[in-house]
Amino acid sequence: MRKGKRRGPIGSVHPVKLRCRRIRTVLQEDIIISIDHSDDPSMNMFPEDFAWGASTAAYQIEGGWDADGKGESIWDAFCHRDDSSVFERHTGDVSCNSYQLWEEDLRCIEELGLTHYRLSLSWSRLLPDGTTGHVNQQGVRYYNQLLDGLLARGVTPMVTLYHFDLPQALQDRGGWQSPDTPALFDAYARFCFGAFGDRVRLWITLNEPYVCAKLGHEDGLHAPGVRGAGGVAAYRAGHHMLRAHALAWHSYDAGYRREQGGLVSMAINSDWAEPEDADSAEDAAAAARYLAFSLGWFAWPLFVSGDYPEVMRAAVDARLPRFSGDQPAALGTADFFALNYYTARKVRSVGVDGGAPSMKTDLGAEGVVDPAWPLCGLPWLAVAPQGLRQLLKYIKATFNHPAVYITENGFAQTGPVLMEDGERAAFYRETVGEVAKAIEEDGVDVCGYFAWSLLDNFEWADGYSARFGLFHVDFSDDERARTMYRSGREYAAIISKHRSRSRAHRELTSS
Ligand code: GBH
C-alpha cells in the first residue's frame, strides 16, 4: 500500500471507482464565489459529487402490512401481540402508507433537492415465506415503480436489503439464531441483485446488526423480543448476520459486480465514546471497550481481522461464536464504510458484580450523557454533533482510511408538534459543519450524508411518539399529508448552497 494514497475499497478489483475524492479548496475562494459564510460552519467545501440524502426503512413507512400478498414479518407479529410492549401498542400497519403514497414520497425527495435516497426492501413483501420458492410480483412491481421514479427524477437510490423486518416464516424456523438463515438471506440478496441491480449501485445488506442482535435478542425491546438469554442469543444472532452479509457480498462480487458495477456494505451504528474522566486510565479503557462492543463488533470482522475485537473475545470468551471454518471469510466484504451515527457518551468503567452473564456485564462500562448536550425527549438521544467528527477520525485511523457514507443521522422531536423546529434545523446545520471539518481538516473520505429521516414514521418501540422526519406526517388523517418542517427547509437550503458552491468552484478551477 503506497503511503498517502487512499486505499481502494477492500476487495479491490472491481470496475467502480468511488468518485468522491476531495476537492482542494483554493485560497480566496470566498471572495471569488462571494458567498459570505464566515459565521456558518457548514459552508466549507464538499466534493461536487457528494451524496446528499435522506433515509427510510420499509416497516417504518410503508404500511400495507398484508396488502397484495405480502407475508408477515417479525415486526408485524411483534406489534400484533396482545402484550405488545410498543408505545401505546402502536403498529406499522398503515404508518405513512408509502405503499400507496410513494409518489408523495418522491415529491418530498424532489422538494428537498436530494441527490440520493436510501430505502429498504421488505423481504416478506417480495418473498412472503422468506424463500425464493414463491415471489410476490406485486411487491416487485412496487419497488420497480419506486426505483424508476427516483431515477426519472435524477435521484440515486441506496438500497438496504434488511432493516429489522425478518419474514415471520423464517423466525418460525429459528430466525437469526438459526445457522440456516444466512443462506436464506443470501438467496434473497441474489434475488434482489437480479431484480433491481440494473438500477441500484449502492447496496446495504443489513442495517445495524447491533440493534437487531442486542435489542431483539437480549433486551427484548425489538422483534423478535427475546429477553435475557444470558449473553448468548445476541452474539449468536450477530454472528449469523455477519455470515449472511459475507455470503451476500461474495454473491454480488462473483455474480453481479462485473455487469452492474455497484458497491456493497453493511450499515454499522455506533455512539462516539470518550472517557468521562480524561485522566483516568480505567475510563479510557472503558471507552475503548464501549466502541469495541458497538462499532468494533461488526467492523473488526469486515475491516480489520476477520474476527471480533480482542477485548470482546477476552470479555465474552466461550459465548462469542468463532469464525473458524466459516467460508467465505467476513474480512474484506465491505466496499465502503456505512455509518449510522446519532449520539455520544461519556464512559466510565463499572465493576462486574458476578451474577448471570449479559452483554452489560461483558461490557463493564457505562455511558452517560454530558449534561451540556441537549436532549429531545428520547433518553438515549443527546445532541453531540462533534462526536460525529471524532468518530469519523477514529474510523479513518482504525479501518485504513475507507470511503465513508454516513447512512443515517438525525434528531427527533417528542411531545407537541413544532412545525418551526428551530432546534432541529440548528442540529442539521451544526452536524453538516462537523462533517465538513472531518473532510477538510481531518482528511476523512466522506462520500455522503443521509439524514434520518425523510418522513415522521414508526419509531420501533417508541411508536409514533418520536418524530424524526424532515417532513411532518399527519397520522390522524387518512391522506397522511406530508408537510415540510423548518428543519426540512434548512436541509434543502444546505444542499442547494453546497451544490452550487461546488459547481461554481469546479467551473472556476477548470477554466
Ligand atoms: C436507527 O437506530 C435505526 O436504524 C432507525 O430505524 C431508527 O428509526 C433511527 O435509528 C432512530 O432511532 O432504547 O435505550 O435501548 C439508531 C441506533 C441504537 C438508537 C439503540 C437507539 C437504543 C437505546 N439506536 N438505541 S435504548
Image (cartoon, rainbow, N blue to C red):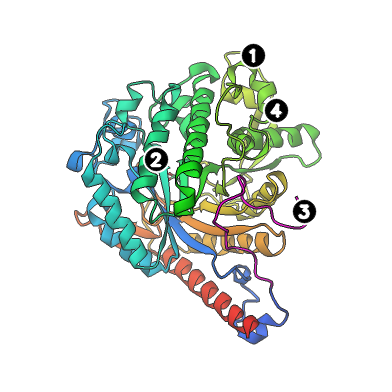
Instruction: In this rendered view, identify the residue nearer to me: 276 or 232.
Output: 232
Residue position for label 2: 190
**Mark 1 or 3, which is nearer the eye?**
3
Looking at the image, which residue is at 64% across and 29% down?
307
C-alpha separation, residue under disc 3 versus residue under disc 4: 30 Å
Q: Residue 378: tell me if it is visible.
A: no
Q: Amino acid at mark 1?
A: Gly
**Mark 3 or 4, which is nearer the eye?**
3
Which stretch did the figure color magenta?
1-24
Residue position for label 3: 2
For residue 354, the mark is: 1
Dominant secondary-structure state across the stretch colored magenta:
loop
Q: Amino acid at mark 3?
A: Arg
Q: Residue furthest top?
A: 355
Residue 288 horizontal/vertical position (percent): 71, 36
Whether the magenta-drawn stretch holds residue 3 is answered as yes
The residue carrying mark 1 has its beta carbon less than 8 Å from ligand 1:
no
> Which quadrant is the C terminus positioned in?
bottom right
Callouts 3 and 4 close, C-beta under 8 Å: no
Residue 33 horizontal/vertical position (percent): 61, 84
Callouts 3 and 2 close, C-beta under 8 Å: no
C-alpha separation, residue under disc 4 versus residue under disc 2: 35 Å
Residue position for label 4: 311
Q: Amino acid at mark 4?
A: Val
C-alpha separation, residue under disc 2 versus residue under disc 1: 45 Å
Looking at the image, which residue is at 48% across and 59% down?
424
